[in-house]
C-alpha cells in the first residue's frame, strides 16, 4: 500500500509486520502484515478502533516487543536481526516515547526526569543540564523544574514527558495517545506543543490518537484496520 | 554516577520529600541488629578483658613452668635466662599444690600458691585485691585466703586454720603422727574471678616448700614484662634459652582451656546474634519486593527509555546496599552511644525494676565492662552490609525479569 512510501530517506521502516496473541485455545491475529515507513522529520498520525493493535504496533516499532513476522529497520540498521537486549541498548539514542499515563519517576523532580535519559547514556555534564533546562523552558515549565510529578497537573506532566522523550535528540518520537488522560483544551495544547518541538528538534513523530482533529495536524494520516495500515 | 545508583539513592531518599516509611523501617531494622551485636560483643569483650587483667595481675604475663620441679642449679639457669631477656621486667619463683584446710572441723581443699613476697610484689599487684589484712604481715606461719573460701568456712582475719598437705598423708600411711600445720589468716583477697576467688590460698614460698617437702625446689616463675612488650614474642624468645624441661607460656596459653571456653561462648553468641540481621534482611527483601510490584510500570518505562535489565536489577540491589550502609552506620552510632552511657542505663534499669536497696547491691554490676575489638566491628560491618545487599538480590531478579511491554501494559 501507499503507506510504504517515504517521501525521502526513511528513519523507520516496517514491512509485513504480523503479531498474534494466544487467546484461549485460539489465536488472536492483531497485526496481519503492516507496512509502514517514516521519513526523517515527518509527522504521521495513526488512528484505529480500540483493540485494533495501535499500541501493539508502536511497541514493535520501538523494539520493546517482537513481531511474529516482518522486517523492521531503524535507519539503515536491520532491527529484526537484533535481540531485545541489543535493541534496548540502541533505543535511548534512537527514539523517545510518550505514553498516555506520562510515567514520570515520582521520586525525581521535573528537571531530573528530563535529565534521566542523558544519565542512562553516561555522564551528565553542563551541556546536558543546559539542554534539559532549555527543553523545560521550551515546554513552558521553566519555573517548575524542581517540582515533583505529584505537584504538577496532568498537562504539565505530559509536557515534562515530551521534554524527556526529546532529551537525547532522538530521530523518532513514538506517542501513544498522549492526550488520553487530558481534557480537550489541555490536550489540544499538548499536541500543538508536541508538533512544534518535534519540528524544531527535527524528530519524526508517530502519533497514535483517537482524536481526528489532532490527527489532521500531522502531515500524513494513517488508519490501522483489520491488522493492516492504510490511509484514513 | 551510574544511573542505577542514582535512581536507587533517589528512591530511598527522594529530593524535597521526607524519607519514605519503608526506608526508615528497613534502616532501623538493620541498625538495631548492628547496635545489639556491637553492645553484646563489646560487653563480652569487656569481661574477657577483665579476666585477662585478673590473670595477669595474679600470674604475670608469662609463666615459666617446669615439667616436674626446678632444683637449685636448674632454677639458677632459668633465672639467668630471665635476667638476660630484654623484655622481662621482674620475675618471682612459685610453688603450687593442693592442701586440706580445716577450720573448726570444717574441711576445704583449696589450691595453694606459695611465693616469695619481696620478689612477687614486683611482678603482680596482688596487694590491690586484698579486702582485709596486708601482704606485709605474711610470714611463714600465716596465709591469705580467697574471699569465697573464707566466707564458706566462716573464717575471719586473725583466725587460726589447720593445713594438711599430701606429705602429711604420706606420713600417716607409715603410721607416723599426723600433725597439721597451724597457720594464722593474715588477710582475705577478692579478685572478682569466680575460679580464683572460690578456693585459693596464698602463702610464703617457704611454707609451701615445707608443706610439700620441696626443700629448695620450685615449680616455676611468674614473669612480668616491660610495658609494651609482646607476650608471645617474649615467651618465644625465652623458650630459646630455657633449659630442657621448662617452658615459657603466655597468660593465654597458661589458661588455654579456660580461654577456649570463653572464645567458644563468644563465637556462639556472635553466631546467634547474626540472625537478628538476617531477619532485618528478610524485611528488606519483602519491602523491596513490594516496591518492585508497585513500580512495575516505571520499571517498564526504564526499559522503554533504553535501560538494560541488569541495570534495573542493579538499581534494586543497590537499594539493599544503601539500606545496609545507612543501617550499619546508624547502628554503630547507636551501639557506641549505648556503650558510652551503659552505666547510666544499667543504673536506670536497676532503679526502674527494683528498689533502692537492691540497687545498691546491684551497683557493683553497674560498672559494666566493655571492650570493643576492631576485628568485631569489622565483622559486624561486613556481615550487615553483605546481608542487606543479598537481601536486594531477589527483588532485583524480579525486576530484571519484567518485560517492558508487559510492565507498561499492567494497570
Ligand atoms: N499481551 C497480550 N496478550 C494477549 N492479548 C493482547 C496482549 N496485548 C494486546 N493484546 C490484545 O491485542 C489487541 C490489540 O491491543 P492494543 O493494546 O494494541 O490495542 P490498541 O489499538 O492500542 O487499543 P486502544 O486504542 O484501546 O489503546 C487487543 O485485543 C488486546 O486485547
Ligand atoms: Mg493502545
Image (cartoon, helix red, strand yellow):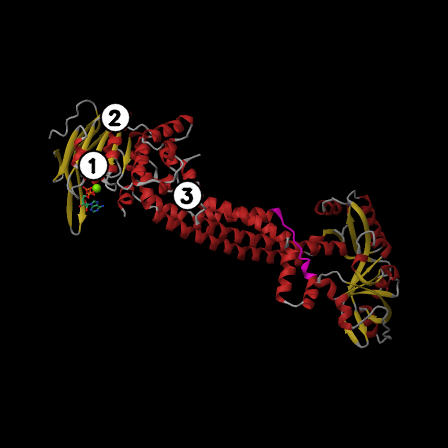
| Separation of marks 3 and 2 at Cα, in angstroms | 35 Å
Farthest front residue? A185
Q: Element under label 3? A: helix
Residue at the spot of label 3 = B11
Q: In which quadrant of the rendered view does residue B116 lie?
A: bottom right
Residue at the spot of label 2 = A199
What is the magenta range?
B364-374
Q: Element under label 2? A: helix
Instruction: Name the foreground residue: B209 vs A138.
Output: A138
Up/down of B19 relative to A209, above or below: below
Instruction: Name the foreground residue: A192 vs B309.
Output: A192
Tell me whether marks 1 and 3 sit on the same chain. no
* A220 in magenta: no
Q: Element under label 1? A: strand
* Residue depicted at 42% across the width and 47% down the height: B392
Q: Position of residue B68 (x, y in %)?
A: 77, 58
Amino acid at each position: 500500500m501507499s503507506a510504504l512510501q517515504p517521501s525521502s530517506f526513511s528513519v523507520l521502516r516496517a514491512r509485513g509486520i504480523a503479531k498474534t496473541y494466544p487467546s484461549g485455545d485460539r489465536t488472536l491475529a492483531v497485526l496481519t502484515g503492516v507496512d509502514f515507513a517514516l521519513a526523517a522529520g515527518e509527522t504521521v498520525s495513526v488512528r484505529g478502533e480500540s483493540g485494533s493493535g495501535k499500541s501493539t504496533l508502536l511497541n514493535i516499532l520501538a523494539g520493546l516487543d517482537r513481531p511474529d513476522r516482518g522486517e523492521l529497520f531503524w535507519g539503515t540498521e536491520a532491527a529484526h536481526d537484533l535481540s531485545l537486549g541489543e535493541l534496548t541498548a540502541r533505543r535511548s539514542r534512537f527514539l523517545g516515547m510518550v505514553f498516555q499515563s506520562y510515567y514520570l519517576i515520582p521520586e525525581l523532580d521535573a528537571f531530573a526526569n528530563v535529565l534521566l535519559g542523558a544519565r542512562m547514556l553516561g555522564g551528565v555534564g553542563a551541556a546536558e543540564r543546559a539542554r534539559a533546562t532549555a527543553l523545560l523552558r521550551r515546554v513552558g515549565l521553566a519555573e517548575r523544574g524542581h517540582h515533583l510529578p505529584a505537584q504538577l497537573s496532568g498537562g504539565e506532566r505530559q509536557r515534562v514527558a515530551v521534554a524527556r522523550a526529546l532529551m537525547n535528540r532522538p530521530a523518532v518520537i513514538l506517542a501513544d495517545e498522549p492526550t488520553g488522560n487530558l481534557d480537550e483544551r489541555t490536550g489540544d495544547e499538548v499536541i500543538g506543543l508536541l508538533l512544534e518541538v518535534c519540528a524544531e528538534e527535527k524528530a519524526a513523530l508517530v502519533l497514535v490518537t483517537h482524536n481526528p482533529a489532532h490527527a489532521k495536524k500531522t502531515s500524513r494520516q494513517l488508519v490501522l484496520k483489520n491488522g493492516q495500515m492504510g490511509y484514513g | 554516577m551510574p544511573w542505577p545508583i542514582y535512581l536507587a539513592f533517589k528512591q530511598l531518599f527522594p529530593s524535597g520529600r521526607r524519607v519514605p516509611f519503608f526506608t526508615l523501617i528497613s534502616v532501623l531494622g538493620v541498625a538495631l541488629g548492628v547496635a545489639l551485636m556491637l553492645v553484646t560483643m563489646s560487653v563480652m569483650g569487656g569481661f574477657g578483658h577483665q579476666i585477662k587483667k585478673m590473670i595477669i595481675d595474679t600470674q604475670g604475663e608469662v609463666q615459666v613452668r617446669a615439667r616436674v620441679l626446678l632444683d637449685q642449679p636448674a632454677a639458677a639457669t632459668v633465672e639467668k635466662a630471665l635476667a638476660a631477656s630484654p623484655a622481662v621486667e621482674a620475675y618471682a619463683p612459685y610453688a603450687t599444690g593442693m592442701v586440706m584446710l580445716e577450720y573448726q572441723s570444717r574441711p576445704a581443699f583449696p589450691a595453694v600458691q606459695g611465693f616469695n613476697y619481696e620478689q612477687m610484689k614486683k611482678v603482680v599487684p596482688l596487694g590491690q585485691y586484698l579486702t582485709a589484712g596486708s601482704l606485709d604481715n605474711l610470714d611463714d606461719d600465716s596465709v591469705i585466703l580467697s574471699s569465697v573460701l573464707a566466707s564458706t568456712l566462716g573464717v575471719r582475719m586473725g583466725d587460726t586454720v589447720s593445713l594438711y598437705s599430701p606429705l602429711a598423708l604420706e606420713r600417716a600411711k607409715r603410721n607416723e603422727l599426723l600433725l597439721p600445720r597451724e597457720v594464722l589468716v593474715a588477710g582475705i583477697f577478692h579478685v572478682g574471678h569466680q575460679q580464683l576467688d572460690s578456693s585459693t590460698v596464698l602463702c610464703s614460698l617457704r611454707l609451701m616448700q615445707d608443706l610439700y617437702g620441696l626443700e629448695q625446689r620450685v615449680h616455676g616463675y611468674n614473669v612480668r614484662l616491660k610495658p609494651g612488650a609482646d607476650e608471645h614474642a617474649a615467651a618465644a624468645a625465652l623458650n630459646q634459652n630455657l633449659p630442657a624441661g621448662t617452658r615459657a607460656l603466655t597468660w593465654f596459653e597458661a589458661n588455654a582451656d579456660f580461654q577456649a571456653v570463653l572464645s567458644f561462648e563468644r563465637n556462639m553468641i556472635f553466631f546467634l546474634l547474626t540472625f537478628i540481621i538476617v531477619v532485618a534482611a528478610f524485611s528488606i527483601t519483602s519491602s523491596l519486593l513490594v516496591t518492585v510490584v508497585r513500580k512495575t510500570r516505571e520499571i517498564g518505562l526504564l526499559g522503554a527509555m533504553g535501560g538494560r535489565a541488569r541495570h534495573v536489577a542493579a538499581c534494586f540491589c543497590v537499594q539493599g546496599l544503601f539500606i545496609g550502609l545507612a543501617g550499619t552506620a546508624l547502628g554503630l552510632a547507636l551501639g557506641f552511644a549505648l556503650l558510652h552511657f551503659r552505666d547510666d542505663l544499667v543504673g536506670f534499669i536497676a532503679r526502674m525494676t527494683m528498689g533502692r536497696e537492691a540497687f545498691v547491691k546491684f551497683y557493683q554490676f553497674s560498672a559494666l565492662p566493655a571492650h570493643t575489638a576492631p576485628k568485631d566491628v569489622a565483622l559486624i560491618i561486613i556481615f550487615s552490609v553483605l546481608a542487606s545487599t543479598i537481601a536486594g538480590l531477589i527483588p532485583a531478579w524480579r525486576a530484571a525479569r519484567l518485560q517492558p511491554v508487559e510492565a507498561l501494559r499492567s494497570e
